[in-house]
Image (cartoon, helix red, strand yellow):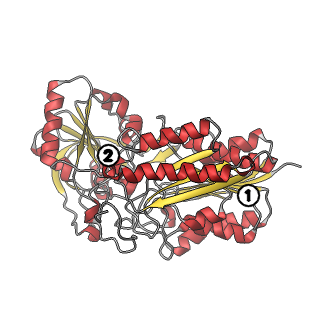
Amino acid sequence: MRRRYVVALIKHETNTFSPIATPLASFGHGEGPAFGDAARAAFEGTATPMAAYLDLARAQNAEVVTPVAAESWPSNKASRATFEALVRPLEDAVRAGCDAVLLDLHGAMVIEDCDDAEGEIVQRLRRIAPDLPIAVTLDYHTNLSGTLVDHATVITGYRTYPHVDMYEAGMRTGRILAGALDGTVLPVMAWGWRPLIASVMRHAPEDGPSGDILAFARRMEADGTVLAATLLPSFPHADTPHTGVSAIVVADARRGGREDAHAVCAHMLDVAWERRAEYVFRAPPLAASVARAKALGLASPGAPVLLIDHCDNCGSGGAQDVMAVVAEILRQQLDDVAIAPIRDPQAVAVMVGAGVGQHVRLSLGGRTDMPAIGLKGTPLEVEGRVQAITDGTFTIEGPMYTGIRTHLGRTAVLDTGRVEIVVTERPHEPFDLGVFTHAGIDPRTKRYVMLKSRIHYRAGFGPIASHIVECAGAGVTNADLSVYPYRKLPRPIFPLDPM
């Protein structure tokens, strides 16, 4: 008989210090969650774990049910009602009967009354079907809990940042589960956690100890010691009891894998702990960074210098309207600059009302106060010509989220003479050139490009850059972890405490 798989996606990276709310409509990146056949259609053929699951099921001629697919930009906690609206269709599909569940989850989702949303999801499915095989693929920025580990059959995660291996991670998870169903492997997992919160700016494998840890993990997989070994460097902007660096290793119990899994997991975490100082990020003053970028652009024209505003990144829960870096670029009179995106629906409405070609004066950005870190929103007074107006919809063509149809909301471009600013109604991290090109701007031809991003920009913009300058503005994705009023975080923990 054909196997029946339940395949679902529920993803939210929760920044518990973010001022941005997370209503049900925020899922689907503002289009709302997708259910049933629409969930399948939204992710079929994309570079995501869910698409990998669908391809694996097709190759096995398995029946597939897709009860829900819901992903939101990072923001603050969702309500219990929103969470239930996403989870109950999944529970109903499992109650109807299936041979396995394959879940595309994040790993750092927090809701108003639960610090471990993914753990609750899998635990609830386990209560419905105690012996059901459950596979989970997690984001690189997971805060892993024992509850999730105890109730899943197989857990693996991404190995790259930017996350350009999401599809491959899902396929790895799904194949291990398929082996368990076929009886060719008996998965066993080992996991561990260290009292270490790593700055996201130091997570990329090429920037710190993660690269060496991941290289070791891949060697252990290649020689057959384990089936999968995953490093999870944490999401430090979630104030939970589970926040911290962890690892999860899957091995085959039929080959004595339990001991191997524990040994590999321990080694990965030992390296992270021994090199913990390398996970601390120290930023130079903003004015110095912009001055350096200006000099680099003047000295080597031909390819853009990237200025990375990493403290206000919507991809980690930022408001995407803090104007500190933009203001410094204007103050130092950098010329031939493209900036994206600034989220400001009110400014978009003014520009749309004026029309293309019209001159406008705007109080741009600064709409959002951030009480968790004591930051008041401060608009920036600018003026210029409305260069373009779009519906903000395009298909991602770069290596991250390839094939996803994405939505910026109504979008307008302001040309100040020196600077072109892409202003949007909705948040969107600029990891794909489409944030510019859909509005008629070719970033490859600019002297300077400013992006509100942290590391994901490298997926689409890294190949076109002559130089990269990280700029410490302000916001709730600040790399200085001392600005956050943690209350639930286990203490002591490095680097907040001497250890």
Residue 185: x and y in percent read 75, 47
Frontmost of labels 1 and 2 is 1
Residues at badges 1 and 2 in contact (C-beta under 8 Å)? no
Query: In the image, is residue 374 above or below residue 469?
Result: below
Q: Report the residue marked by disc 2.
A: 412
Image quarter for residue 318? bottom left
Q: Give the residue type that dot 1 points to.
A: Pro
Q: Please name the residue shown 15% across and 35% down the image.
A: 294
Q: What element carries label 1?
A: loop
Q: Specify few, some or many for label 2: CA neighbours under 10 Å numbering under 14, 14-19, or 20 or more.
A: many
Q: Which of 178 and 96 is in front in this view?
A: 178
The quarter of the image holding the C terminus is bottom left
- In the picture as drawn, the residue positioned furthest to the right comes out as 1
Q: Report the residue marked by disc 1.
A: 133
Q: Specify few, some or many for label 1: CA neighbours under 10 Å numbering under 14, 14-19, or 20 or more.
A: many
Q: Please name the residue shown 11% across and 39% down the image.
A: 333
Q: Please name the residue shown 43% across and 40% down the image.
A: 211
Residue 456: x and y in percent read 39, 43
Can residue 403 be seen?
no
- Left-right relation of 206 to 446: right
Residue 296: x and y in percent read 17, 30
Q: Please name the residue shown 24% across and 56% down the image.
A: 322
- Left-right relation of 27 to 103: left
Query: In the image, is residue 135 above or below residue 80?
Result: above
- Left-right relation of 431 to 42: left
Q: Which of 141 and 15 is in front in this view?
A: 141
Q: Is mark 2 on a helix, strand or loop?
A: strand
Can residue 19 be seen?
yes
Residue 416: x and y in percent read 18, 41
